[in-house]
């Protein structure tokens, strides 16, 4: 059984809508996780410590909504409930193309001054929450939310810097393909994604990825080339 994902309106009471969401999810069979690491896409496994997203931890993503969608895609495809708070430009159509299950996605585009309340409430009931925090977030609020994550086992992905992030991810190079001599269509984006450990002091890892490739998927550049090289010449061209 699946339920359509509710789009929470800023005009309505955030507390009431979150309570309704909690009730709806509780009435369904919860996703069972066999480990403390959430499954992720193979393209991202090499740059994430442990090969996946750690439950109860926070991650920060510099600038790229597409990279945040890539982090959501793995848990979503495994059946996890996910949420997105404070990202009005998060496109549902793009999320669907990237394999994110909209039936298990909760969108709160503009939480306003209820950001902390809404985010904390979703952390209580969802597996992964992506958010953009207000510019002024106190150390006390960061600490309280971090304690909530550890208690509930939720994974938080923050757009921008976050003091308690387990790993910081950023796109360090980017190149689009598909355009010819002033014409054509953008068909793929080749990027270098770099992850750095807590506080920028841990080990750095980098990988060249298609984000996305021509089929709107996420792959390592080497994997895509190996697949292409195995095709007949006519098909590969």
Image (spheres, rainbow, N blue to C red):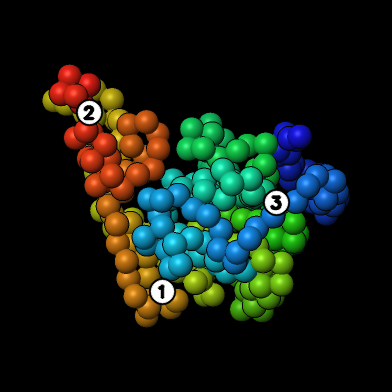
x and y percentages locating residue 50 in the rendered image: 46, 67
Identify the mark at residue 31; answer none if there is no mark.
3
Task: Please tell me how many numbered marks the rendered image carries.
Answer: 3
SS at circle 3: loop
x and y percentages locating residue 98 in the rendered image: 48, 38
- 159 vs 76, nearest the viewer: 76
Q: Nearer the viewer, mark 2 or mark 1?
A: 2
| Left or right of 196, for residue 154 | right
Q: Which residue is mark 1?
A: 197
Q: Which residue is mark 2?
A: 231
Name above or below for residue 137 compared with residue 75.
Answer: below
Count neighbours of disc 3 (C-alpha within 10 A) and say few if under 14, some if 14 to 19, many if 20 or more: few
Which quarter of the rendered picture does the N terminus lie within? Answer: top right
x and y percentages locating residue 77 in the rendered image: 56, 43
SS at circle 1: strand
Q: CA distance from mark 2 to mark 1?
A: 38 Å
User: Which residue in the rendered view is the most extreme toward the top?
Assistant: 234
């Amino acid at each position: 059984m699946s339920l359509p994902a509710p789009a929470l309106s800023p005009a309505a009471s955030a507390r009431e809508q979150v309570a309704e969401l909690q009730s709806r999810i509780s009435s369904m069979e919860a996703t069972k996780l066999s480990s403390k690491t959430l499954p992720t896409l193979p393209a991202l496994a090499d740059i994430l410590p442990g090969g996946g997203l750690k439950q109860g931890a926070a991650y920060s993503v510099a600038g790229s909504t597409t990279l945040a969608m890539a982090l959501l895609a793995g848990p979503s495809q495994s059946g996890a409930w996910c949420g997105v708070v404070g990202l009005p430009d998060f496109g549902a159509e793009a999320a669907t193309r990237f394999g994110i299950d909209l039936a298990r996605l909760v969108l709160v585009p503009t939480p306003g001054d209820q950001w902390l309340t809404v985010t904390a409430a979703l952390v209580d009931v969802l597996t992964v929450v992506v958010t953009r925090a207000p510019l002024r977030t106190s150390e006390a609020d960061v600490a309280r939310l971090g304690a909530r994550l550890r208690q509930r086992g939720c994974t938080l992905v923050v757009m921008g810097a976050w003091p308690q992030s387990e790993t910081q991810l950023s796109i360090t190079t980017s190149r689009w393909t598909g355009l010819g001599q002033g014409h054509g269509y953008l068909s793929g984006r080749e990027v270098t994604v770099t992850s750095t450990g807590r506080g920028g002091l841990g080990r750095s890892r980098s990988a060249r990825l298609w984000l996305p490739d021509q089929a709107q998927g996420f792959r390592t550049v080497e994997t895509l080339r190996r697949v292409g090289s195995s095709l007949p010449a006519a098909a590969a061209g």
